[in-house]
Amino acid sequence: MGRAAIFLCGGFAIILGIIQFNILNSQVSQSKLNVEYVNQSQARNMAMSGMEFGIREIMHEEGFEWRPDPQPMKVTFNGTGIDVYIDDHSTHPAELETDQIRVRAESEMFERTSRAEAILVRESIFPPIPGAMGFYGEDSQLNIGGNAKVYGEDVDPPGGAPGDGENKPGIASVIGEDELINSTGNANEIDGEPPFKEEDLDAEELQENIDNYLAEAESYTGELGTAENPKIIKLDETVKLNDEGGAGILIIPPGVTLELRGSFTFEGLVIVQGALDIRGNVTIYGSMLFGDNSLLEIEDADPSQPELSGNTTIQYSSSALANVNQKFAHKFDKQPEIVSIRD
């Protein structure tokens, strides 16, 4: 019995030892899991903090001054470095639409990498864009001759690569096609989805937008802006341009004429309330809107009949308009809206 008791006690001791060893192993494993969870949570929190920093930068009054950069901003929180990327359609055309901004943040802690991402959409400073050209006047008449082209399919300037925005009509008008258009050439082309659309265009809304633009506009002094630095320009008197170009919002008020000669390219929105005289290889990326009393003249056009001919191309471009919107949204109290967040 003595030996049996000794063996029995020894067996119990071994079993208890095994149980205690397993408990200790379980505690160690749980501790490791807890540490990993804490590390992962900290990395995630840092990534979210970096993403919030990027959103605040965009929401800042001057936030729309930024330009996408493949190199990240370096941000430090509590001694931890975070990479913050701000992208848009120009840097990731296959991933982002023309009105979207993406904020990405990456944080690494204790060999753990965490990421957070937000998609924002810019509010528009523009009225609804009806097409490559929009006519708001019931008495409008458009003579198309020569080699004129009006395209509503969305493209990205320069070069005209297909854009990712929604295609528009080539021409939208408050009156019908037969009333508006008189085609006199053999090589004219109007295309879009559809090529022509008759619709109610709100002239009062257009004028409200024009009034807002004029409050922020610069008088023309020899520059019309660039794609990198677009401008809102109003003409105070008749201006003749040869081979120049520009980007932004160009306003031709009533009683003022803009004469375009040579090769001229503009990216953005052109608003015609006065007269536009085109005699050259002119390309407009974006949209042209014509007020009630506007006039578009080419060559020796009849002053009572807007005419489009020569080698003029009016090409709808959502990215050209989005670039201008990005620059000036804060001036018109238009802030980006967050539409999605993920980590």
Image (cartoon, rainbow, N blue to C red):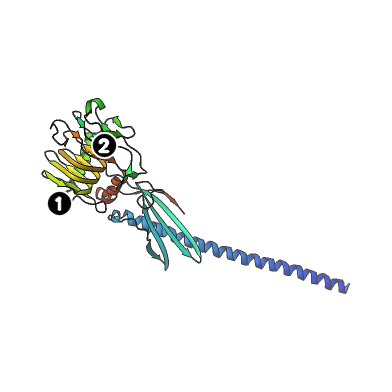
- The residue depicted at 28 percent of the width and 45 percent of the height is 321
Instruction: Return the residue nearer the eye: 226 or 260.
Output: 260
Image quadrant for the N terminus? bottom right
Q: Amino acid at mark 1?
A: Gly
The furthest residue to the front: 186
Q: Residue at x 65, y 67 (%)?
A: 25
Horizontal arrangement in the rendering, residue 118 relative to residue 232 (left or right): right
- The image quadrant of residue 107 is bottom left
Residue located beneath label 1 in the image:
222
Which image quadrant is residue 197 in?
top left
Q: Residue at left 66%, top 68%?
A: 24
Hey, which quadrant is residue 207 in on the image?
A: top left
Residue at label 2?
A: 149
Give residue 65's position: percent from left, percent from top.
28, 55
Q: Nearer the viewer, residue 13 or 130?
A: 130
If you read the primary sequence from the N terminus, does the residue marked by circle 1 or circle 2 appear first?
2
Tell me whether circle 1 and circle 2 mark residues in contact (CB < 8 Å). Answer: no
The spot of residue 327 in percent (x, y) is: 27, 51
Which percent across, then down, holds residue 253? 15, 40
Q: Is residue 166 above or below residue 337?
A: above
User: Is 120 positioned to the left or the right of 259 in the image?
Assistant: right
Is residue 176 in view from this perspective? no
Query: Of tags 1 and 2, which is closer to the observer?
Result: 2
Q: Position of residue 153 (x, y in %)?
A: 33, 38
Residue in front for this viewpoint, 260 or 61: 260
- Asked if residue 196 can be seen in this view, the reply is yes
Residue 308 or 82: which is nearer the viewer? 308
Report the amino acid beneath label 2.
Lys
Crowd around label 1: few <14 · some 14–19 · many ≥20 (10 Å): few
Q: Crowding at label 2, few (<14), some or many (≥20) Cα neighbours within 10 Å?
A: many
